[in-house]
Image: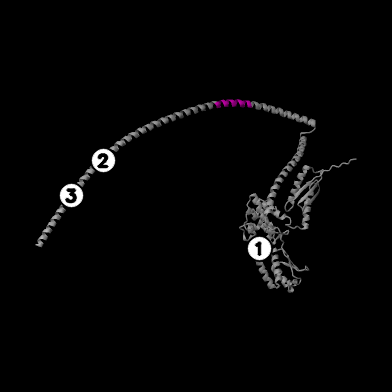
Amino acid sequence: MYFEKTGVIVIELLVISLVVVVAAGVSFMAGIMLRKRIAENKIGSAEEKAKQIIDDAITQSEATKKEKLLEAKEEKIKMKTEIEKEIKSRRDELQATEKRIIQKEESLDKKYLALDKKEDALEKKSEKLEEIKNEIQSLKLKEVELLEKVSNFTTEQAKEYLIETVKEDMIHEMAIVIKEQETKAKDEANKRAKEIIVGAIQKCAVDHVAETTVSVVALPSDDMKGRIIGREGRNIRAIETLTGIDLIIDDTPDAVILSGFDPVRREIAKITLERLISDGRIHPARIEETIAKVEKEIKDEIKETGEQALMELGITSMNTELTKLIGKLKYRTSYGQNVLKHSIEVAHLSGLLASELGENVALAKRAGLLHDIGKAVDYEKEGTHIEIGLELCNKYRENEIVINALASHHGDVEPKYVISVLVQVADAISASRPGARRETLESYIKRLQKIESIANSFKGIEKSFAIQAGREVRIMVIPEEVDDDAMVVLSKEVAKQIESSMEYPGQIKVSVIRETRAVEYAK
């Protein structure tokens, strides 16, 4: 019973499921058909809209096309009108230009005719001028003949007289012009030169004390002389052999004199002897050891001195050998003036003068420092210090300006550059500064005599006096033989003769004095 009811229920459920499935299928098919119909309706509507849009577009494009064609036709007509106007304007301009050209041609034709007439008139005038010239020439000849008869002078004699008269007038005028120009130039040059030189000297902070190399060693007592000589002279022979310096032990109390041309070796011998005397142990082995040590110290000091000089002047690069030679100048003197200090002083002055004139300051300092470099080894080589210095600078490839400054600083060679002249001036300033150098009495007297003899060699000189240590010569002239105008020429000739025949530091002033006296007695 139970199973029968269950089977009926299952069958019913199956039937219901089947009905539901069939209903769902029918509904699905109906939905598909409905959607298909809706889609077809939409497609048809879209096709109609698209067709309408295409028709509207075609209509609009046709209208636009017609409108553009009309605009193009109007533009064409407008451009054609403008071109025609421009062509007409150009045509009018051409016609006006052509008219002006025709008028100018007619004007030129008239001018050509006028010029032809003027040429004819000028030819006639030139013919008349030629006739007048011939007449004047004949009149001049007659005038010259008449003047010769009246004056009793021939033409040549008259020319000579005239030339002599003009010559005297020219000498007078030339003397006046020379005086005026010389006074003006001297005033301006002296003012500017004083400003430059005084400014340079004021800025120069070099030590002006001239040091001389000491060649005398003080002894604590005369007993030390025997110890220096040693047994059978072995100590003194050892010192002289190793240093190359002669020791002179004489009756001079408490002193030994060192004699030698090489200032560096003389300095080594001096320091060695001082240390041996201080130490008290004097024998050949100790002497050899002390000399070797002092030589090394002096070499180091020479190099350090050269480097200090370069540093003081701000020179950044220099050949090592040249630096050592600069250091050697410390032991060299000239007329009592230390050559290293003199060279540094010249370098400073050259640099300061160069800065005033807008020249290369570094190069001027370099040239000033090296101008006396030959004196560092002039006791070792033959030749003047200039020749030796040129050889060294060429060897170490120094600048051409430095070489020319070195060669020309004593006037042996013509200075090619402004810096060469500045070094020459700075050298003269440093050497002629009061107290810088000592001069022997004999050479001093010879220099004064030479100046006076040059002055006395000229005609019309009564007396001459060299004064102010040879820096001025005063010349008394015979007033009857030398007039005021000739005085100016005479002073210049004497100055030139002194320049060409003498060497001297600084400058020599030439003063020519003429005195005229008129004496009468009242009776």
**Is residue 486 shown above or below 231?**
above
Image: magenta residue range: 107-122
Mark sitting earlier along the chain (3/1): 3
Mark sitting earlier along the chain (1/2): 2
Across and down, in percent, residue 85 comes to 43, 29
Across and down, in percent, residue 493 comes to 75, 47
| Labelled disc at residue 388 | none
Mark sitting earlier along the chain (2/3): 3
Which quadrant would the N terminus be assigned to in this image?
bottom left
Q: Mark 3 highlights which residue? A: 29
Disc 1 to disc 2, C-alpha distance: 114 Å
Residue 112 falls inside the magenta stretch: yes
- At 69% from the left edge and 27% from the top edge, which residue is drawn? 132
Most foreground residue, 190 or 21: 21
Across and down, in percent, residue 168 comes to 77, 39
- At 37% from the left edge and 31% from the top edge, which residue is drawn? 74
**Is residue 91 shown above or below 215?**
above
Residue 149 falls inside the magenta stretch: no
